[in-house]
Amino acid sequence: MKIPKYLVPNDYMADPAVHVFQGKLYIYPSHDRESGIEENDNGDHFDMKDYHVFSMDDVETGAVTDHGVVLDTKDILWAGRQLWDCDVAEKDGRYYMYFPLKDKNDIFRIGVAVGDRPEGPFIPQEHPMRGSYSIDPAVLCDNGVYYMYFGGLWGGQLQRYRHNKALESAVLPTGNEPALCPKVVKLRDDMLEFAEEPRDVSIVDAAGNPLTADNPHRFFEASWMHRYKGKYYFSYSTGDHHTLCYAVGDNPYGPFVYQGVILTPVVGWTTHHAVVEFKGKWYLFHHDSVPSGGKTWLRSLKVVELDYDDDGKIKTIAGTAI
Ligand code: FUB
């Protein structure tokens, strides 16, 4: 599928996390809605309240099944507002949905909800994961060990923390200072809590130097991890530079060496994605705001095939391709 295809034309869905469970492809997006909240740098206009799950038997020809609402803020005891990008992992036949949500003090935490099937429903735990903060969790299963990647700047609140402790006031590095790093943390065996303190995910240039704050390819949000030919591909959004980029490493903790752009800017401020292999082909699931006429808080899910060159480099896809 060389031409991108919209997947859910009758509703607004964004931030896809995508996995193959039980031979089917499952999509876990954010559910955008018109809240009437004015657009600002804090992302208050992304005021989502629930999640749907979608599945596909075949990306090339298949229909998309909507499994309906699988988790709602009204069922989360600690909920404040804003259900942003989630992910789902399977372990021993149970499915764990990880979701960022502001608590009643307007601080983003990461919660877990548990289900018996990939299509949910998911029952939330009574409290967020201890020691969790910021947004955009993405989970990798690596030889039976589970790692969560997370973090996001600006409205994602990552700049409010250093060494996993809350700061008195938020600090964003500038100029040639090292950029803020996304985080990685191993999950406990029961999948409900962190097994260790989150660590920095170091993204470095070819010479081994960390990408700096003024580098247009530095991390902003939307972590995703996939493996290809024995390597670990960490991909992310550059936020205010509007590209999806990736870096490659030799193990889940990194460091990851910057490689290039996966997707050039789309219509709409945010860009966010999942890379997944299904039935022998690789796909980039992502979103844009074309169907809503450019409203950045009303985004639509898309999929397009993704290719590698002989050296394992991802070939750049045009965000405006139709
Ligand atoms: O959907 C809300 C936020 O927008 C996500 O958490 C970010 O990754 C961006 O896509």
Image (spheres, grey):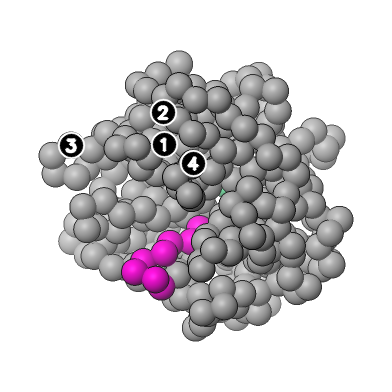
Q: In the rendered structure, does residue 75 fall within the stretch colored magenta?
A: no
| Magenta segment boundaries in residue numbering | 137-145
For disc 4, does the CB lie below 8 Å from ligand 1?
A: no
Is there CB contact under 8 Å for labels 3 and 2?
no
Circle 2 sits in a helix, a strand or a loop, which is it?
strand
Does residue 163 appear in this view?
no
The x, y position of residue 96, in whole percent, is 60, 63
In front: mark 1 or mark 4? 4
Residue marked by disc 3: 309
Residue marked by disc 1: 284
- Which three-letter amino acid code belongs to the residue tagged 4? Leu
Task: Work out whether residue 83 or residue 121 is closer to the camera in this orientation and state it.
Answer: 121
Does residue 221 appear in this view?
yes
Disc 4 crowd rating (10 Å Cα; few below 14, some 14-19, many 20+) is many
The x, y position of residue 109, in whole percent, is 68, 67
Left or right of 146, for residue 103: right
Left or right of 149, for residue 258: left
Residue marked by disc 4: 25
Residue at position x 59%, y 61% in the image: 95
Q: CA distance from mark 1 to mark 4?
A: 13 Å
